[in-house]
Image (spheres, grey):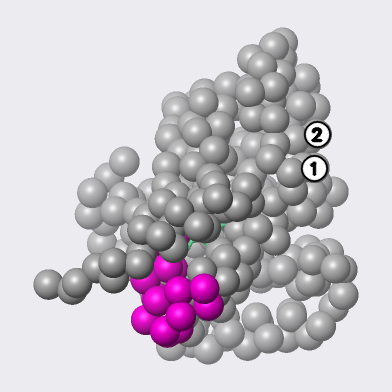
Amino acid sequence: MEQTDPRLATLVAAVQAGASYRSIAVGVIERVGRESLQRYPSLKAAIKATKTRLHQMIGAYTEDRPPYRQWLAELQQVADEMARKAVCRRLLAGHASTRERLPVLEHLYPACFGDSPPQRVLDLGCGLHPLAVPWMHLPPNAYYAAYDIDTALCAFLHEALPLLGVRGEAAICDLMLGPPPVSADVALVLKTIPLLEQQRRGAGADLLRAIQAPRLVVSFPTRSLGGRNVGMATTYRGYMDALTAAEGWSPRVIELPNELVFVIERHTPSRSRM
Ligand SMILES: C[S@@+](CC[C@H](N)C(=O)[O-])C[C@H]1O[C@@H](n2cnc3c(N)ncnc32)[C@H](O)[C@@H]1O
């Protein structure tokens, strides 16, 4: 059995002392910390490396800690679908990743799902994206399962999902260790593959292969957070071309102003159902 480095607890405590890392699931801090301790002999260097990697995974996409309690209160008060959309639109504007999707919300989901909206949805590395549920036209009784590594975000989403009109859950899942062990009609993996590939080459492709869903909606940013276009579309198109050719998948590509979306239909044996 692998021995735990006795310095791991000190490293985790040092990382959690930083406000930006406090809500990251402790298992994720431990995983990244363990890898950093193996790579850097000095504890100080390992702590720094852990923070840098966690920042790349989550920090760059979050702004100040959102007022989740207040957001829930606002969602609880909406009187109809129009009011719900107005609140969600405002909340989606609070996250860099979802803000830039606002202009295309009305068209994106019909383009992805066609005339068969899914009954069961997985949203992996979800961020605030579940707040777009009101635009998805999901059938009554749809089940939405959202996963991320931020505990405060997941707690908020778990309470928010019924207020968005779906049954569901939001839970912690470190995608570097694989997808959650549940199947669905569609898995949304939006703008998260580059973060996984940054941590381990091949991790994003491994995840997509392992997901238990016949339809994948996978997207990539085509502009950096600073708004520059640095050949990202070409890079990610090449990445997906290689993967889909190797797997025999034939994706449909949707080009958004800041995002490249691949819709992949495939056949997978289903195991445990949600
Ligand atoms: C660029 S944001 C995308 C958010 C959302 N999918 C969207 O497109 O609006 C990337 C998300 O992946 C999450 N993430 C990063 N590394 C992860 C990991 N190893 N496992 C699960 N989620 C991860 C981050 O916390 C963040 O919410």
Q: Is residue 123 magenta?
A: no
| 255, above or below 75, in the image | below
Q: Which of the pair 185/209 is nearer the observer? A: 209
Q: Is residue 268 left or right of residue 72?
A: left
Give the residue at x 79% y 71%.
224
Give the percent coordinates (x, y) of residue 223.
Answer: 80, 71
Disc 1 and disc 2 in contact, CB within 8 angstroms: yes
Q: What kind of residue is marked 2?
A: Arg
- SS type, badge 1: loop
- Residue receiving disc 2: 90
Q: What kind of residue is marked 1?
A: Ala
Give the residue at x 54% y 38%.
152
Q: Would you identify the image quadrant in which residue 227 lies? A: bottom right
Q: Which of the pair 34/61 is nearer the observer? A: 34
| 137, above or below 246, in the image | above
Q: Is residue 37 magenta?
A: yes
Q: Quadrant of the N terminus?
A: bottom left
Give the residue at x 63% y 88%.
238
Mark 1 and ligand 1: say if the CB distance to the nearest ligand atom is below 8 Å: no
Q: Quadrant of ligand 1?
A: bottom right
Please state the extent of the stretch shown in magenta in the rendering: 28-45
How far apart marks 1 and 2 lie (CA) works out to 5 Å
| Residue neighbourhood size for the residue with mark 2, other residues' Cα within 10 Å, grouped as few (<14), some (14–19), many (≥20) | few
Q: Would you identify the image quadrant in which residue 219 lies? A: bottom right
